Amino acid sequence: MGFFKKLFNKIIPQPSVWARPEMEITFRAEIMPGKSREERTFRIKEVFQNGRVKLYDFPDEHRQSSFEPINFKREK
């Protein structure tokens, strides 16, 4: 019985979810200098298992550190 108790009590780590599909995120100003916030803001198309995201109308995959911290209290 002890074997099953150890087997089922293991905590499986889940990756942190920092983004969801259709959410808007903004590239950091250092990555796109000279562009306004609106020009640096894109919508997420897909979130991958490794935490990277694919954006609508922008090539390649990008990681969390490429974007400004998400502020849910900021008004649009």
Image (cartoon, rainbow, N blue to C red):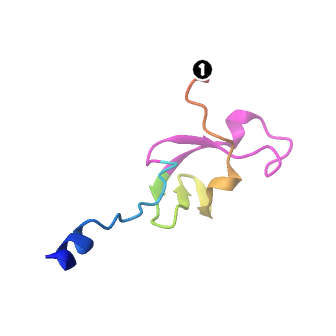
Please report the residue visible at 79 percent of the width from the left and 48 percent of the height from the top: 32
Question: Residue 53: x and y, percent?
Answer: 54, 58
Name the outermost residue toward the front: 2
Query: Is residue 27 inside the magenta stretch?
Result: yes
The residue labelled by disc 1 is 75
**Compared to 54, does 41 lie above or below?**
above
Image-quadrant location for residue 71: top right
Question: Residue 61: x and y, percent?
Answer: 59, 64
Q: Is residue 30 left or right of residue 8?
A: right
Please report the residue visible at 23 percent of the width from the left and 68 percent of the height from the top: 8
- How many numbered discs sit on the rendered protein? 1
**Compared to 69, does 4 lie above or below?**
below
Name the outermost residue toward the top: 75
Name the outermost residue toward the bottom: 3
Q: Is residue 59 left or right of residue 17?
A: right
Please report the residue visible at 57 percent of the width from the left and 23 percent of the height from the top: 73
Q: Closest to the observer: 75 or 38? A: 75
Query: Is residue 29 inside the magenta stretch?
Result: yes
Q: What range of the chain is rendered magenta?
A: 20-44
**Compared to 40, does 57 lie above or below?**
below
Q: Closest to the observer: 24 or 35? A: 24
Which quadrant does the C terminus fall into? Answer: top right
Q: Is residue 59 left or right of residue 34?
A: left
Please report the residue visible at 52 percent of the width from the left and 49 percent of the height from the top: 18
Which quadrant does the N terminus fall into? Answer: bottom left
Residue kind at label 1, given as amino acid type: Glu
Secondary structure type for disc 1: loop
Q: Residues within 10 Å of mark 1 (few under 14, many from 20)?
A: few
Question: Residue 24: x and y, percent?
Answer: 54, 40
**Compared to 17, does 52 lie above or below?**
below
Name the outermost residue toward the right: 34
